[in-house]
C-alpha cells in the first residue's frame, strides 16, 4: 500500500499509517465488487493522513502506549474526515457546476452521499469497538456532533460579506481545528495521559488545525497568482471568503464589496482585481503571519509535554506544515 | 407537539411517541436559529413513527421495562431513519429533476446533506448514552453499517431490468426490513428478554418490514391508477423496479422490457402501457398476497411472545398496516 511520500522521513510512522489505512480498508465490506473497489479507491485518493499521524504521535504522551488501539482510533477519525470530505465534495461540485465548471453525473452524487454515510457508520463502528469506556466514546461522539454543527453553521455564511477576522477564525475553529484537536486529544486520552497533558494535547491540536487551515486558504489564492493549474480561486467562487480576502476587505472595503456584489460566477476580470487588491494590501503576508503565530502557539504547548522521541516528530511535522506548498 | 393522528387510538403510545420526538428535538443544537428551526421542521415533517412505536412496544417483552431507555433507543433509531430519508430525498430529487419535475435549489441540497450527517451523529450520540454495554451498542452499530451497505448495493441495480422476485425481496430486506427488525430487536434486548424472545422479535420485525415495503411499493402504482395527485409511478421513473412490475415482467417479459428500454423519463404513454400490463397480469393482486403472507408470518411470531397488553397493540398495529392506503 502506498501513502503520501512525505512519510518516508518517518519510517515507523509510515508503517503505522499504512496499518491505519489497512484497517479502514478491512471495514469496507460491500457485496457489489465494483462499489467495493470504488470505495477503496476513494479512501486512497485522499489526503496526507496528517490527522491520524497526530493521533499516533499523541498516543505516546501517556504511560500506556497501546499501538493497536491508537491505530484503530486514528482510523476512526480518518474515516470521519473522509466521510465529511466526500459530502463536502458533493456540495462543492454542485457549486462549481453553477460556476459553469465541470459537470458531475448524478450517479456519482448518489454514490458519494451513500458512501459518505457508510463511512460515517464505519467510523462509529471502529470507535465503539475500541473506545476504553462508553463515557469516553461518548465524548468523542459529542465532539463529532459539534464538528457537524460547524458545517451547518457555515451554510448561511456563504456569500455573506467577509465581515471580520474573528468570524473567520471562529468558522475554521469549528471546521478544521476541532478535528485536529480531537485527533491529538483522543491519542493522549487513550494513552492514559494526565488531565493536564490531555488538555495540552487538545490545545496543541487546535492551534495546529488553525495554522493548517489558514495555510490551506492561502494556497487557494497563491494557486491563482501562480497559475499552477489549480482551481481558480475556488473558495471565492464558492462564496467562502477566507483570510487573505478578509484582510483585503478590511484595508479596502469599498472596492472589495463592489466586486463581491457582482454576478456569480465572478469574471476573470473580477478575480484579477481581487487578486491585485489582496497583493496591494498584503493580505497573504498578513495571513501567513497569523499562521506562524498559531504554529508557534502549538509548539509552545508541545514543549510542555513529556520528553520522548514522539515529541521530536511532532515538532518536525508541525513546523514543516507551515512551509508546505500543496 | 402533534404527531400522526393514527396514534389517537393508542393513548399511552401516543404520549410516549411525543416524548421520543421531544428527545430528538432536544438534541438539535445548532447555533444558527434559522438552521435550528428548519431542522426541527424537517424532523416533524415526517413519518408515522411506526419504527419507534415497535421499539416501544417490544420494550415490554422482557421483564425489565425501562420506559426512559426505550424512548431513547426509539429516538436514536428514528433519527437514523430520518437521516437516511433526508439523504434519499437529495438523491431522488436529483432524479426527478432529470425527469423534468420540480427544481431543487442547491441551498436545500447542501442543507440536506449536512443535516443528514448531523442527524447521524445524533443517532450515535443517543445510542452511546443509553446502550447497556459497549458490546450491545456495537451490535446496533454493525446493523446500521449493514443498513447503509444496503443503500450502496442498491445503487447499481437501478435501471437494471427487474429480474426476479428473489432479488427484489433481498433488496427490501436490506433496506426496510432490517430497520424494522432492528427496532423490534433493540426494544426486546433492552428489556432483558430471553435470547429466544429476542430472536422472535427480530424475525417479527423483519416480516413486518417486508410487508410494509411491499405495500409501500404497491401504493406507488395505485397512486398512478387512481390519479390521486401522488407522484406518477415515481419508483419506475427513478429506475426502481418493484414487485407489481416484476410480476408483470415475469408474465409478459417482452412487452415490459421493450417499454423499460425506452428513453427516460418515460412518457405518459409508456406509463399507461406499463400500468395496463400490471393490471392485466394482476401484478398488484399478487404483490398484495405476498404482503399478506409476510403479515401472517409476523403475527405467528408475535403469538409466541409472552402475554401482555403490548401484545394486543402489536397485533392491531401490524394487521392495520396491511390495509393502509397512504
Image (tube, coloured by chain):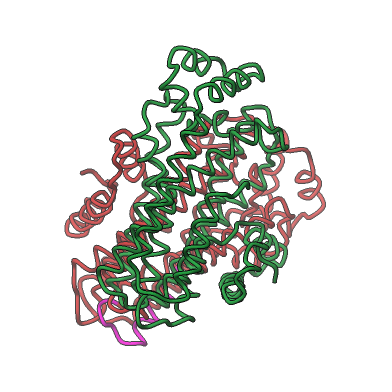
Chain colours: A green, B red
Relative to B119, residue B144 above or below: below
**Residue B59 x, y percent position in the rendering:** 26, 72
In the depicted view, which residue is nearer to us: A195 or B205? A195
**Residue A160 x, y percent position in the rendering:** 42, 25
**Residue B33 x, y percent position in the rendering:** 28, 35
In the rendered structure, the answer to whether residue B114 lies left or right of residue B42 reads right
In the rendered structure, the answer to whether residue B137 lies left or right of residue A49 reads left
Q: Residue at x 54, y 29 (%)?
A: A236
**Residue B27 x, y percent position in the rendering:** 27, 52
In the depicted view, which residue is nearer to us: A164 or B272? A164
Q: Magenta stretch mostly in which secondary structure? A: helix
Q: Which residues are magenta?
A: B190-207
* Viewport quadrant of the N terminus of chain B: top left
Q: Residue at x 25, y 70 (%)?
A: A195
Relative to A66, residue A43 above or below: above
Relative to B100, residue A314 above or below: below
In the depicted view, which residue is nearer to us: A235 or A145? A235
Amino acid at each position: 500500500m502506498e501513502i503520501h511520500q512525505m512519510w518516508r522521513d518517518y519510517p515507523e510512522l509510515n508503517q503505522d499509517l499504512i496499518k491505519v489505512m489497512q484497517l479502514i480498508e478491512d471495514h469496507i465490506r460491500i457485496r457489489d465488487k465494483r462499489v467495493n473497489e470504488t470505495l477503496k479507491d476513494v479512501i486512497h485518493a485522499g489526503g496526507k493522513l496528517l490527522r491520524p499521524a497526530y493521533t499516533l504521535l499523541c498516543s505516546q504522551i501517556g504511560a500506556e502506549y497501546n499501538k493497536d488501539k491508537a491505530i484503530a482510533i486514528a482510523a476512526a477519525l480518518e474515516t470521519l474526515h473522509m466521510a465529511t470530505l466526500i459530502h463536502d465534495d458533493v456540495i462543492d461540485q454542485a457549486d462549481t457546476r453553477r460556476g459553469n465548471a465541470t459537470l458531475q453525473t448524478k450517479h456519482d452524487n448518489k454514490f458519494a452521499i451513500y458512501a459518505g454515510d457508510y463511512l460515517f457508520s464505519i467510523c462509529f463502528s471502529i470507535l465503539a469497538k475500541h473506545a476504553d469506556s462508553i463515557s469516553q466514546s461518548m465524548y468523542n461522539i459529542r465532539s463529532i456532533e459539534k464538528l457537524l454543527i460547524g458545517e451547518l453553521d457555515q451554510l448561511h455564511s456563504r456569500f455573506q460579506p467577509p465581515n471580520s477576522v474573528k468570524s473567520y477564525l471562529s468558522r475554521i475553529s469549528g471546521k478544521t481545528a476541532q478535528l485536529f484537536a480531537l485527533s491529538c486529544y483522543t491519542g493522549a486520552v487513550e494513552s492514559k495521559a494526565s488531565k493536564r497533558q490531555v488538555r495540552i494535547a487538545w490545545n496543541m491540536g487546535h492551534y495546529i488545525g488553525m495554522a493548517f487551515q489558514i495555510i490551506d486558504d492561502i494556497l487557494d489564492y497563491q494557486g491563482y497568482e501562480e497559475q499552477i493549474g489549480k482551481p481558480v480561486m475556488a473558495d471565492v467562487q464558492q462564496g467562502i471568503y477566507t483570510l487573505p480576502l478578509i484582510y483585503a476587505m478590511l484595508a479596502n472595503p469599498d472596492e472589495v464589496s463592489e466586486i463581491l456584489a457582482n454576478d456569480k460566477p465572478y469574471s476573470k476580470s473580477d478575480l484579477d482585481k481581487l487578486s491585485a487588491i489582496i497583493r496591494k494590501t498584503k493580505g497573504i503576508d498578513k495571513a501567513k503571519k497569523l499562521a506562524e503565530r498559531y504554529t508557534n502557539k502549538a509548539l509552545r504547548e508541545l514543549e510542555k509535554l513529556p520528553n520522548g522521541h514522539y515529541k521530536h516528530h511532532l515538532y518536525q511535522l508541525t513546523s514543516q506544515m507551515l512551509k508546505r506548498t500543496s
